[in-house]
Amino acid sequence: VHLGGLRCFGAAVCEGNSSRVVSPWHRHRWVAAATGHLRTAPGPAATIAGRHLASQAGGGGEGGAGSSATGSGQPPPGTPPKGAQAPGGTPTPEDPYGLGPNAGEMPKGGDNVQFTWKSAIFTTFVCGGVYWYYEYLRARKEAESRAVTRQERIGTPKLGGPFELVDRKGKPVTDKDFLGQYLLIYFGFTFCPDICPQEMEKQTRAVELIEASIGPVVTPVFISVDPARDTPEQVDDYCNEFHPRIAGLTGTPEQVKKVSRAYRVYFNEGIRNSDQDYLIDHSIIHYFVGKNGKFVDFFGKNMTAQEMADKMKITILEDREKAKQRKERRGVESAEDEEKASGGSSASTAAVWPAIAT
């Protein structure tokens, strides 16, 4: 661009014998200011161009008397060329270029140029997709963390059997005392700090769900694997924190070992700090036993109370339907007596053998 004696070559500007290296942005500002197309306050570059054009308008050539800032006929620095119309308004001493009071200010609403409805809708869809994917992964991980069970029909399993223990009041009880009742048995110990209370709460909740839908047909049972510390009084005090119908059982070390082996319950005493300060490592399983005392199903730690109740409910309703059919077919007065006489249970003909893979 050639403006009189002012030349701009790329990013270099030459004025007389001096040279300045400037950015293309400043170069365009200088040209716009010199030609009257810049509506913002001019910088030093615009003043240089204005001076040169003013000297040309006053008759002074490049390098002549008119190019001096103090020469005759040249206007003061910072004023527009003679005869040139100011772009935007009438020049005043305070505003020699007539730019107006709002020069250099962004119009109202122009400061939010980054927001659009399209970008807002797009962001909403992206966030929704990310949240859905997170929930999908979380649900899949919970499903995979559950115990994987395999059921094989191989006849009557070798789980459960006769036992002799002591109840919460110190009274001897046997397995025969629970015939005619569905049992939900859990093995633990009263000094367990965290796992046992959680599982006992889950047992209580599962029994309450059954009571709400069918009735009080399932008896919760707690059997201690710590006979040294779990006296009948200790077990009674512990069971008061859970279901009101819970049967708390303990016994001698030999009695506890016998019933634990019958249900294949693992337990092992940990490091002893004292005679009363130790923990016991044991399996975490609830055993569902039919009204005839036969093992029916088991529920692992990862199973919820609702899932336990749903499975028990299916078995109970099936047994009721079978008892009703037997009564109609044989004309038996009491379906309950028939069930006891025949040992009827969903596990009497084909039982479930649990195999846990975690």
Image (cartoon, helix red, strand yellow):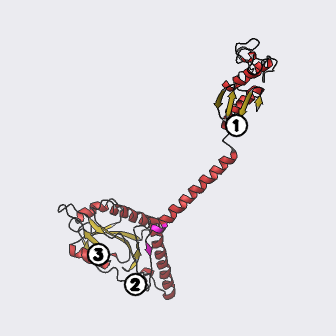
Query: Which residue corresponds to the image point at 28% horizontal and 65% vertical from the top-left?
Result: 189
Q: Look at the image and say whether residue 116 sits in the magenta stretch.
A: no
Residue 334 visible? The answer is: no
Residue 304 — which label?
none
Q: Earlier in the sequence, mark 2 or mark 1?
A: 1
Q: Secondary structure at mark 2?
A: loop
12 shown above or below 158 = above
What is the spatial separation of the Cα atoms under label 3 and label 1, in whole angstroms? Answer: 93 Å
Residue 124 image position (x, y, % from top left): 63, 50
Residue 182 image position (x, y, % from top left): 39, 74
Q: Mark 3 belongs to which amino acid?
A: Ser
Q: Nearer the viewer, mark 3 or mark 2?
A: 3
Q: Are marks 3 and 1 in contact (CB under 8 Å)?
A: no
Residue 343 — which label?
2
Q: Mark 2 belongs to which amino acid?
A: Gly
Q: Nearer the viewer, mark 3 or mark 1?
A: 1
1 shown above or below 50 = below
The image quadrant of residue 345 is: bottom left
Residue 10 — which label?
1
The image quadrant of residue 302 is: bottom left
Task: Tell whether 262 sits left or right of 212.
Answer: left
User: Bounds of the magenta span?
Assistant: 143-151
Query: Which residue corresponds to the image point at 67% horizontal and 26% vertical from the top-left?
Result: 17
Name the residue that disc number 3 marks.
260
Q: Nearer the viewer, residue 68 or 338?
A: 68
169 shown above or below 119 = below
Residue 164 image position (x, y, % from top left): 26, 76
What is the spatial separation of the Cα atoms under label 3 and label 2, in whole angstroms? Answer: 24 Å
Q: Nearer the viewer, residue 288 or 338?
A: 288
The residue positioned farthest toward the left in the image shown: 275
